Amino acid sequence: MLDMEEWMNIKAMKREGHSIREISRRTGRSRNTVRKVLRHAAPEKKKRKKKGSILDEYKAYLKKRYLKTGLSAVRLLAEIEPMGYGGSIDTVRRYLREIDEEERVSSKATVRFETPAGRQAQVDWAEIGRMPDFNGLLKKVYAFVMVLGFSRMIYVEFTRSMKLDVLIECHQRAFAYFGGTTQEILYDNMAQVRLPSGKLNPKMEDFLTFYGILPKTHRAYRPRTKGKVERAVSYLKDNFIKGREFAGFEDLEARVRAWMDSTANRRTHATTGRVPFEMLGEEGLLPLRGKYRRTESVQRTVNAEGYVLIGGSRYSVPPKMVGRKVTVLSGTGRIKVLAGDTIVATHRETRKKGQSVVDPLHAAEMWKLSLGQKRVPKVKPAKLLIAMPDERPLTVYEEVIG
């Protein structure tokens, strides 16, 4: 590092007309050093090395725990002492005050993000109270809320569950209400969307991929990035829920739809200064790609009676498949049974459990086989026999199975 006298000397030699090479020769400094001095109007100040803190290696842990739980310095000190911390509680308290100050400044510095048309929707769940079910038992009621970031159009649906299947169905009805989908949807880190490992839930990812939607989750401990839907939830509770009584769940559902159509999406929005319904035409939503149906694939072994069990019901297969492993595809309204890559049986999927769905060809073939046995195998009683007319000759299955 050059001192002030040497720095001034180099500047003086340059004013006298000496070349950089000559100045370098006279001072013993490299040409790059001379050039650096000449480029600056004043000498650089020596940076002091920042002194480390005994708390440094524990700060990341403390910040995460403090923001998540709000634990006191006493509690947090008890957690980090077994990790090796040997400092005082005052040092911990000072650091917690720094975190509080950072959060205070950060909250004031938050910049409102205005979403481009068609870019993003935001989704959240909200627990709104309890209502009696069909048996008169009080059960929790949740509100599914989706808001379009550009137009602020709101969709609300009340449910008694937050399971993944319910979430997907709510999405589909929201898409139908809006008339399309956005390019991406922002969620919090709800378990239905993001697994504890941090990976996206495969089923939710499959659903969103079908519609060409990119799922996004907000940064941990920064729910303000999902502010539009948070404000929509507050608006729902204040403008629709508060002070009202409902005759039952059906009444709640009917009245929220009327509220969406006549109030929530017809008001002049405080931020945009425009009516959400009138802005919907400018959203440029992606067109819907039909109705999503997830295909489930499972392995089954055909039992002695010539059935595979799926979803609590039995579906027949050719009797010659007894004892063999097959692949069963379901979830699209049809059951398909495959031996390798060959479909050996198809059925209409039943929604009720405990049913037996039988192809007449399979029943006839099973009967023929039973006649050649000394003892006819017992068949469990079925609650329902669904006959599926089929013009296929019996030889079709014999050719497949060999």
Image (tube, helix red, strand yellow):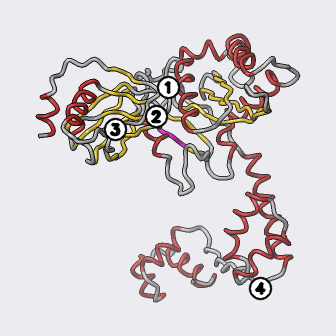
**Neighbourhood count class around disc 3 (C-alpha, 10 Å): few under 14, some 14–19, many 20 upward:** many
The answer to which of marks 2 and 4 sits earlier in the sequence is 4
What residue did someone put label 3 on?
Answer: 307
State the residue at coordinates (24%, 19%).
390
Task: Give, as a single range, the part of the protein colored magenta.
Answer: 211-216
For mark 1, what is the residue?
181
Marks 3 and 2, how far apart in space?
Answer: 39 Å
Q: Quick check: marks 2 and 1 in contact, CB under 8 Å? A: yes
Inter-mark Cα distance, 2 to 1? 8 Å
Against 389, residue 220 (above or below) is below
Q: Is mark 2 on a helix, strand or loop?
A: loop
Contact between marks 3 and 4 (CB within 8 A): the answer is no
Tell me if residue 230 comes above or below residue 109 in the rendering: above
Q: Does the magenta stretch include residue 217?
A: no
> Given the image, on which type of amino acid does mark 4 rest?
Gly
Q: x%, y% of residue 136?
A: 79, 28
Mark 3 vs 4, N-terminal side: 4
Residue visible at 16% across and 27% down in the picture: 394
